[in-house]
Image: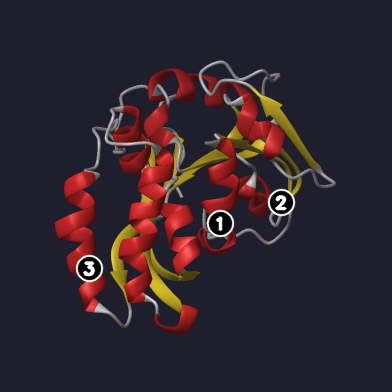
Amino acid sequence: MAERYLKGRPRYHSFVIGKIRESLRLREILAYSLDVGCGTGFSTVALKEISDKVIGLDVSAEMVALAKRKKGIDLLVGSAEELPFDESRFDLITIAQAVHWIDKRSFFAEAGRVLKPDCWIVAYDNYFLGKTADDPDFSVWYRNEFLKIFPSPPRAERSFPAKSEDPKAFVLVREEWHENEIELSARETVDFLLTITNVINAVENGVGKIEEVEDWLLENINPFFKDDGRNSFAFMAPVWYLRQNRWKL
């Protein structure tokens, strides 16, 4: 799965990091940032665009082992609920496409400990909307065929509290939604779909072997690509800005 993730996940993270830079009005490079749930490191590399040093942390040793090493980036295996860092170390914490996998109460307590005062947690995602710019038939196939075989499994709630009586609690200060397009070939589209939770969950529950799912996807997706071309797929990137209750943007 880690290898499929490295191969198939679209690189959208720099787009979101640019939005974070604008929203937080960052005029200078941050000194030290933490990327929680870094996976194979795409989000960590993007975070380096606004931070001099970055640590990427993920609970999966297999994911971390495949992440690309770059100057100024350290990659560690560890848990979001038990961050292995000293107090008041980081200027920013990001968590990309992983907030639904963690215990938020434990994570926020740890984040409050390792963040410097008056600093931010920024969580973000990039939802596949199941449509292309030029072919409405793809949306019909995605809705009526793909999602019937590979329905979305239950996930932890992504909402965040906007108020709290606890001054140390992290609350949602701002929420943004950024539509974006990612251009993919038929092969890249299949590689991406093989990484999403719908497919992974279905395979784990016996819908078929991953190789069988791959063959089915290639057969069904190829007709939407002419002459081995590429399609622009619509995504929606939510960005959640969280800060301890005593601070405001």
Disc 2 vs disc 1: which is toward the camera?
Answer: 1
Residue placed at 62% from the left, 41% from the top? 40
Residue placed at 65% from the left, 45% from the top? 44
Where residue 159 sits, quadrant-wise, is top left
**Marked residue nearer the N-terminal end (2 or 1):** 1
Percent position of residue 99, x then y: 42, 35
Residue holding disc 1: 13
* Residue 148 visible, this orientation: yes
The dot on residue 48 is: 2
Disc 2 vs disc 3: which is toward the camera?
Answer: 3
* Residue 175 visible, this orientation: no
In the displayed structure image, the side of residue 91 where residue 129 appears, left or right: left
Residue placed at 69% from the left, 20% from the top? 85
What's the amino acid at mark 1? Answer: His
How many residues crowd around disc 2 within 10 Å: few (fewer than 14), some, or many (20 or more)?
many
Indicate the secondary structure of the residue bearing disc 2: loop
Where residue 67 sits, quadrant-wise, is top right
How many residues crowd around disc 1 within 10 Å: few (fewer than 14), some, or many (20 or more)?
many
Indicate the secondary structure of the residue bearing disc 3: helix
Looking at the image, do the residues carrying marks 2 and 1 touch, with CB atoms under 8 Å apart? Answer: no
What's the amino acid at mark 3? Answer: Ser
The dot on residue 139 is: 3
How many residues crowd around disc 3 within 10 Å: few (fewer than 14), some, or many (20 or more)?
some
- Look at the picture and state if 220 lies above or below 45: below
Percent position of residue 49, x then y: 70, 57
